[in-house]
Image: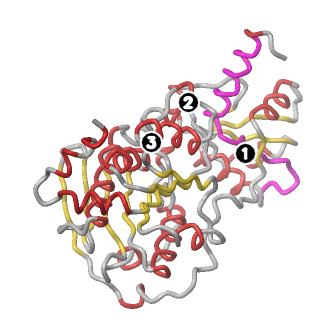
């Protein structure tokens, strides 16, 4: 019976109908509908949180399927936020689902976050984490943070009941060279599910005012030996007094790096012009596992040493797994090759494989 949907929670000692009602009345914003955001959304949706907002603008790619278990092969190329809304609504028709089909930026963060009680940071980049922190401090909203890397992950709750903020633990953005890159170093598929579940639990505890919230505590998880370590950290007064956002956040949607679609790149490469080349900047190991035709391999760390050779080309396309490192390659070489046409292949090999599959399907069906 429908009224028994949450009976395992309402009958739970120290939870009960009162805390279930608190879940129903809560409005939670989840930033990112990927590896971390999916388990957060699935559990909060199943447990009866009344309103869930989602911020996302990516599409489903092959490399997502290893850890983003809400999506299936039939969803490839579709907007994540659309697929998530449809599947979450099927799981619980009572939940109000709100789509914010955008990336979180300096210009929209305060407006989007203002109407929610709590934010879950399930993003995958540092600028967004600092933006969420600063907006939550200004609006006096708590937020639950999670991050993953390889076999490891971490969880904490910030700006909760006068507790520490994210900047109390990490005062400023790290240097670009010190930022871990999961595209290069990878992540074990199950780790986001574990960390995201921890985030969902902390979210429930904050909403229902349960004891033991990880405020002022950074929980470190290591999947290699299933160990958990907790590190306490204090609040720093200067990081809690903020009236406006910074002016130097990186905007995920505002990138001056020239990009082209895989289709445009393919047309140029198949023209067999001697002045056009495709450079694969992935690691040697990635290349061994998934080589691509008509590409020359120059790993990121060797690009600077190849400038003289590359200068002989008029148009150079750079490709990697997802399109992130290829954009870095273009940024690195633009000042060194100012008179050459340098492009990053948007979406990388993931987009290329999806596009080739779509073209093959169209040809089989006789479509133009």
Q: Residues within 10 Å of mark 3 (few under 14, many from 20)?
A: few
Q: Is residue 251 above or below residue 6?
A: below
| Numbered label attached to residue 344 | 1
Image x and y of residue 324, in percent: 61, 48
Image x and y of residue 102, in percent: 64, 56
Q: Residues within 10 Å of mark 1 (few under 14, many from 20)?
A: many
Q: Quadrant of the C terminus?
A: top right
* Element at label 1: strand
Image x and y of residue 8, in percent: 18, 45
What distance separates the C-alpha of mark 2 from that of mark 3? 44 Å
Q: Is residue 250 above or below residue 189?
A: below
Q: Is residue 262 left or right of residue 338?
A: left
* Element at label 2: helix
Say if residue 271 shows up in the picture: yes
Q: Nearer the viewer, residue 366 or 232?
A: 366
Q: Residues within 10 Å of mark 2 (few under 14, many from 20)?
A: some
Write down the residue under mark 2: 287
Image x and y of residue 115, in percent: 52, 69
The boundaries of the magenta stretch are: 336-363
């Amino acid at each position: 019976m429908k009224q028994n949907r949450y009976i395992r929670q309402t009958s739970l000692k120290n939870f009960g109908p009162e805390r279930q009602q608190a879940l129903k009345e809560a409005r939670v914003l989840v930033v990112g509908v990927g590896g971390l955001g999916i388990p957060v959304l699935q559990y909060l949706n199943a447990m009866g949180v009344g309103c869930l907002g989602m911020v996302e603008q990516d599409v489903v790619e092959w490399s997502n399927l290893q850890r983003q278990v809400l999506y299936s092969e039939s969803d490839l190329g579709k907007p994540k936020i659309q697929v998530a809304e449809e599947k979450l609504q099927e799981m619980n028709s009572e939940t109000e689902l709100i789509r914010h089909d955008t990336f979180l930026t300096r210009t929209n963060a305060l407006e989007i976050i203002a109407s929610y009680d709590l934010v879950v940071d399930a993003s995958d980049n540092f600028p967004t984490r600092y933006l969420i922190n600063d907006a939550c401090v200004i609006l006096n909203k708590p937020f639950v943070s999670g991050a993953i890397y390889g076999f490891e992950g971490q969880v904490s709750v910030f700006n909760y009941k006068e507790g520490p903020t994210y900047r109390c633990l990490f005062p400023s953005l790290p240097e670009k060279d010190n930022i871990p890159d999961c595209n290069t170093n990878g992540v074990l598929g199950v780790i986001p599910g574990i960390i995201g579940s921890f985030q969902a639990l902390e979210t429930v505890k904050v909403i229902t005012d349960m004891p033991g919230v990880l405020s002022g505590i950074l929980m470190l998880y290591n999947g290699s030996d299933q160990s958990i370590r907790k590190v306490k950290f204090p609040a720093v007064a200067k990081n809690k007094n903020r009236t406006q956002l910074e002016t130097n956040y990186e905007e995920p949607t505002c990138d001056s790096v020239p990009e082209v679609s895989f289709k445009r790149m393919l047309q140029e490469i198949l023209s067999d012009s001697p002045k056009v080349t495709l450079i694969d900047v992935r690691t040697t190991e990635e290349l061994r596992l998934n080589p691509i035709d008509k590409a020359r391999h120059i790993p990121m760390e060797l690009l600077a040493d190849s400038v003289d050779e590359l200068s002989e080309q008029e148009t150079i396309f750079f490709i990697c797994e997802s399109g992130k490192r290829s954009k870095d390659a273009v940024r690195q070489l633009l000042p060194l090759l100012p008179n050459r046409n340098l492009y990053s292949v948007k979406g990388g090999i993931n987009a290329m494989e999806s596009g080739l599959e779509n073209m093959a399907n169209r040809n089989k069906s006789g479509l133009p």
